[in-house]
Image (spheres, rainbow, N blue to C red):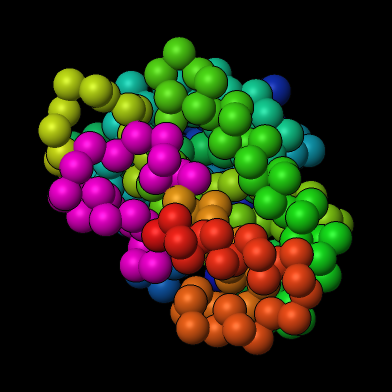
Amino acid sequence: MSPSEVVGVANIERTYGLQIFRGIKNPSRDKVIQLAFGFALNLDETQQLLKAANKKVVVKCYLKENCNIQNLTLGFLRSLNHKGLAKFYESYGNVTNFFVLQDYVEGITLSQYVNERLPSEKETISIIEQLCDILIYIHSQKLPIIHRDIKPSNIIINDGKITLIDFGSCGFFDDKLIEDTLYLGTKGFAPPEQYGYAQTDRRANIYAVGMVLLYLCTGNIDLKNTRTIRNKHFSIIIKNVQNFL
């Protein structure tokens, strides 16, 4: 997770997730951090439940009115098992919020990583290959998962290994819909259909991966800056991405 997110520690094997949710009592604003669609809750109030801790987790609270996550989605996410995804353990909803208990992921965001220095060609290829492997997995599910907010700040990197996080915008592909019911995503990384022009499908995730590749190569997502790429192999890739877009 990014350093700005407030996390707690819990032994999932001994402490049932719902106990942790019920242990959170009206956290004050100075104990929460604003996220894209909700808050990450400080678990200091629940330390009495976490004495036998041996696993780090994060609790996130998503505001129902501003996000697409729902009980069905959360139930499905709990069944996922991939090295590039944080493990989901438990969820709890009330009238206004969804609380999600999931693995805490060590590392820094890809945004922070690139801000420190542009990755090498080898590192870039490795990151994109790992991201594609995650997409192959979530796309191959019985109900293909459309993340809809793949971007550098939602990718954690640690010792060269990446984890895709924050499924608050995700949904399933539904070929019966003409367009999305919620307009979600991040400008520059989201394709036009996510703004209501059509129903999103797997291609929305693939589009975002292409923009992440551009970001890794240039440090931003301005297509004009592709001329700063000197490596001939990357130049060819970016040119093809431009033609595709």
Q: Who's the residue at 85% across and 60% down the image?
A: 122
Residue range corresponding to the magenta coloring: 182-206
Q: In which quadrant of the rendered view does residue 103 lie?
A: top right
168 lies above or below 202: below
Q: In this rendering, does residue 16 appear at all?
A: no
- Is residue 195 found inside the magenta-colored segment of the image? yes
Which quadrant is home to the C terminus?
bottom left
Which residue is located at x 16 percent, y 39 percent? 179
Q: Residue at x 65, y 24 (%)?
A: 81
Q: Position of residue 221 (x, y in %)?
A: 50, 74
- Assign the magenta stretch its main secondary structure: loop
The residue at 74%/39% (across/down) is 55
Horizontal side of 224 relative to 9 (left or right) equals: left
Q: Is residue 64 visible in the rendered structure shown here?
A: yes
Residue 206: percent from left, percent from top: 49, 45
109 and 99: which one is in front?
109
172 is higher (above) or lower (below) than 116: above
Q: Of residues 29 and 91, which is closer to you in this image?
A: 91
Quadrant position of the N terminus in the picture? bottom right
Asked whether residue 119 is drawn in magenta, I would say: no
Left or right relative to 161: residue 163:
left
| Front-most of residues 83 and 222 | 222
